[in-house]
Image (spheres, helix red, strand yellow):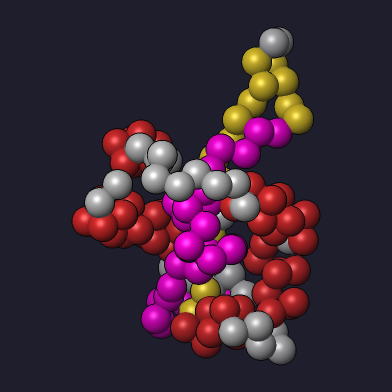
């Protein structure tokens, strides 16, 4: 995947995360001021950089329901800095915006080594369908 393709996916992903939160910080509830899409785990983890299909325990017949987790949250600039730099508000941000179980699940998936096997068109199509 080229750098240009990665940047395009970053733009789409960021807009989705912010739109999902209605451009409101999911921690302090401030709205519209320097909103940023924050990754639950660092974006260097390509397995979850643009989200991933999280298989749930729900089944309909023989089909397991798959849901797409964007693995991101919308934060204002100040809350995002606290989260990324492991500041004093980090634990509160995790509790309020992510949830411990979800964070652990995303971290486990993020540690998969996907290397450069991800397909740009497939990820783009998935994000645009959300």
Q: Say whether residue 74 is visible.
A: no
Say which quarter of the image contains residue 117. top left
Q: Tag count in the figure?
A: 0
Q: Residue at x 52, y 74 (%)?
A: 75
Name the foreground residue: 33 vs 98.
98
Q: Viewed as shown, does residue 12 lie left or right of 99?
A: left
> Residue 9 location in percent, x, y?
33, 52
Q: Viewed as shown, does residue 112 lie left or right of 9?
A: right
Q: Is residue 86 above or below residue 65?
A: below
> Residue 18 location in percent, x, y?
43, 63
Task: Please say whether residue 33 is one of the residues in the magenta stretch.
Answer: yes
Name the foreground residue: 49 vs 74.
49
Q: Is residue 123 above or below residue 60?
A: below
Q: Viewed as shown, does residue 64 lie left or right of 6?
A: right
> Residue 27 location in percent, x, y?
62, 75
Task: Please say whether residue 26 is one of the residues in the magenta stretch.
Answer: no
Q: Say whether residue 59 is visible.
A: yes
> Residue 81 location in percent, x, y?
53, 84
Q: Residue at x 41, y 82 (%)?
A: 33
Say which quarter of the image contains residue 87. bottom right
Name the foreground residue: 30 vs 81.
81
Q: Residue at x 62, y 52 (%)?
A: 111
Q: Residue at x 43, y 73 (%)?
A: 36
Q: Viewed as shown, does residue 122 lie left or right of 107?
A: left
Q: State which region is magenta.
A: 29-56
Of all residues, the one furthest to the left in this rendering is 4
Of all residues, the one furthest to the top in this rendering is 61
Query: What's the magenta bit mostly, secondary-structure-wise?
Result: loop
- Locate the C terminus and report the quarter of the image it occupies: top left
């Amino acid at each position: 995947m080229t750098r240009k393709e990665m940047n395009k996916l970053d733009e789409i992903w960021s807009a989705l995360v912010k739109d999902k939160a209605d451009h409101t910080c999911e921690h302090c509830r401030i709205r519209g001021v320097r909103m940023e899409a924050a990754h639950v785990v660092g974006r260097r983890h390509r397995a979850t950089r643009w989200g991933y299909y999280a298989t749930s325990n729900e089944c309909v017949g023989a089909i397991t329901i798959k849901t797409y987790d964007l693995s991101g949250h919308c934060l204002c600039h100040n809350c995002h800095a606290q989260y990324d730099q492991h500041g004093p508000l980090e634990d509160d941000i995790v509790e309020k915006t992510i949830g411990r179980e979800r964070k652990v699940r995303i971290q486990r998936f993020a540690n998969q080594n996907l290397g450069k096997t991800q397909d740009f068109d497939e990820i783009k199509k998935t994000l645009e369908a959300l």
